[in-house]
Structure formats: C-alpha cells, structure tokens
Image (cartoon, helix red, strand yellow):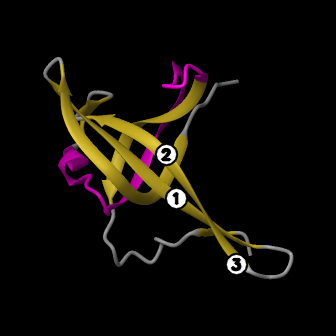
C-alpha cells in the first residue's frame, strides 16, 4: 500500500507575500474556501475555512509561472500536501498549525461556473 498526503483547494486568495530565500522565490499566501449547508430549520449557512499556503517558484523541478498572479482576491486552485507545524504563541502556549505546501497552482477566471461553495444540500 502507498501512503498519500494530498490536498486540493479551490478558493480565494486572502493575502499574498512573495519573498526570497537562498535566491529562490517563494509565495506565502492564504486561501479561503466555503462550505454551504442547511441547519435543521432549513436555514442556509456558509462556513469559511482559511488555509495558510506556500509555493516555491520552482517546485518538484517544475517552474510555477502563476506565482506572480497570486494576489489578494484571485480565485485559485491549489494542489499540494499538508504539513503539521508546532510553535509557541505569544501567550507562551504551544499551538499546532496545518500548512499547505503547494506543488501546483492555477489562477482561475472569475466567470468560471465551478467557483461556488461546496454544498451539502
């Protein structure tokens, strides 16, 4: 059996910051996804989920030309893996964060009909 750690997201970029590390460019960004459902009374509810992600200009030996298009408000489709990270917060409490290490990213056009919240009804 093969182990697998794959995540695929489609959402909107919240923040974006392109930096450099050892001469390689990296983009750290956030993505929000939405999950729509109905409660017992039939009222609709949308649950946003925020993800922190990063992608290197060269990932897995392939260039990521979309890195300059990752800007606030852009619709993106991200494929990568999850990484668990532990850190000590400012209140001196150990916390756990899940980060998406993107391998591929595609900037979508705003008129794409597939850009709707995931629905459970």
Mark 1 / mark 2, whichever is N-terminal: 1
Q: Nearer the viewer, residue 43 or 121?
A: 43
Which residue in the rendered view is the most extreme toward the bottom? 42
- Measure how far apart labels 1 and 2 are at the Cα level: 8 Å
Image coordinates for residue 103, horizontal then vertical, percent: 38, 37
Q: Nearer the viewer, residue 27 or 4?
A: 27
- Bounds of the magenta span? 65-94
* Cβ atoms at labels 1 and 2 below 8 Å apart: yes
- Which quarter of the rendered picture does the N terminus lie within? top right
What residue does disc 3 label?
44
Which residue in the rendered view is the most extreme toward the left? 23
- Which quarter of the rendered picture does the C terminus lie within? bottom right
Image coordinates for residue 56, horizontal then vertical, percent: 27, 32
Q: Residues within 10 Å of mark 1 (few under 14, many from 20)?
A: some
Examine the structure image and report whether residue 79 is included in the region drawn in magenta.
Answer: yes
* Cβ atoms at labels 1 and 3 below 8 Å apart: no
What residue does disc 1 label?
33
Q: Residue at x 68, y 72 (%)?
A: 45
Based on the displayed image, in which of its 4 quarters is residue 57 positioned?
A: top left
Which residue in the rendered view is the most extreme toward the front? 91
Please indicate whether residue 121 sits to the left or right of residue 76 in the image: right
What residue does disc 2 label?
51
């Amino acid at each position: 059996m093969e182990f697998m750690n794959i995540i695929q997201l489609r959402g909107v970029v919240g923040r974006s910051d392109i930096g450099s590390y050892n001469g390689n460019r990296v983009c750290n960004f956030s993505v929000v996804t939405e999950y729509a459902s109905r409660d017992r009374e039939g009222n609709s509810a949308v649950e946003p989920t925020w993800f922190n992600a990063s992608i290197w200009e060269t990932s897995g030996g392939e260039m990521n030309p979309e890195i300059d298009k990752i800007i606030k408000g852009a619709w993106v489709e991200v494929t990568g893996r999850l990484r668990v990270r532990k850190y000590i917060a400012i209140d001196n409490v150990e916390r756990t964060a899940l980060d998406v290490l993107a391998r591929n990213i595609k900037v979508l056009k705003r008129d794409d009909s597939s850009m709707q919240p995931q629905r459970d009804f």
